[in-house]
Amino acid sequence: MDVTLHLAQDPEADALLGRSPLAVLVGMVLDRQIPVEWAFKGPAAIVRRMGTEELDAHEIVVFEPETFARLLSDKPAVHPCPGPMAELVQQLCRYLVEHYDGDPEAIWRDVDSGQELLRRLEELPGFGRQKAQILLALLGKQLGVRPAGWREAAGAYGEERSFRSVADITGPESLAKVRAHEQETKAAAEATGTEPHG
């Protein structure tokens, strides 16, 4: 994988995301209750603190949980909830090691349909249906992973130029549109007394 992404709005972090599928998955896990660009800067921060150049699922799973949690909690913290997020990242990496020999691209390399890929993504620790659909849309729109029916499987997130999620962020202007959509969704949810997802 070698693509140009602008999810973190930071050259170093985006370069890592562009070459590392695991960094994208970790960014997706971290993308909760913080601005999206902060979440996708997280993988680069973890790499620096591990003292390596790339994220490797095999390396992450052998960390003592307390040690790995410290990597995320050292200031500036990678996430406001570094302990639970560190645990979730290690769970994700353990799942990848056990089911895909630590190779995230194996999730989609031989997949036949968008629905099958969605099912595989939903099985990942830290991913519910909505997050899986957003990742599926990101894979299709920006990473060239387009099995038959991928847009349909991704739901509204798969729509062209929908600006609903990280899948549509290609620079500052699209980030602003996605943020505006999120604020509208949150306001609508508050007005109806329901909790927004994501």
Image: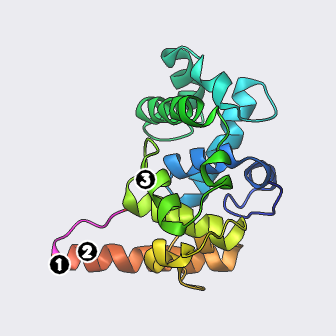
Of labels 3 and 2, the one closer to you: 3
SS at mark 3 in the image: helix
- Which residue is the site of mark 2? 189
Q: Is residue 145 left or right of residue 151?
A: right
Residue type for callout 2: Ala
- On whether residue 125 falls in the magenta region, the answer is no
Tell me whether the residue at label 1 lies in contact with that at label 3, contact meaning CB atoms closer than 8 angstroms: no
- On whether residue 194 falls in the magenta region, the answer is yes
Residue 192: numbered disc: 1
Q: Which sits in the foreground, 73 or 31?
A: 31
At 59% across and 48% down in the image, what residue appears?
25
- Which residue is the site of mark 3? 122
At 73% across and 52% down in the image, what residue appears?
17
Specify start and end residues of the magenta stretch as a single range: 193-197
| Quadrant in which the N terminus appears | bottom right
* Main SS, magenta residues: loop
Of labels 1 and 3, the one closer to you: 3
At 28% across and 80% down in the image, what residue appears?
188
Residue type for callout 3: Glu
Circle 2 residues within 10 Å: few <14, some 14–19, many ≥20? some
* Nearest to N terminus: mark 3 or mark 2: 3
SS at mark 1 in the image: helix
Q: Position of residue 174 (x, y in %)?
A: 64, 78
Circle 3 residues within 10 Å: few <14, some 14–19, many ≥20? some
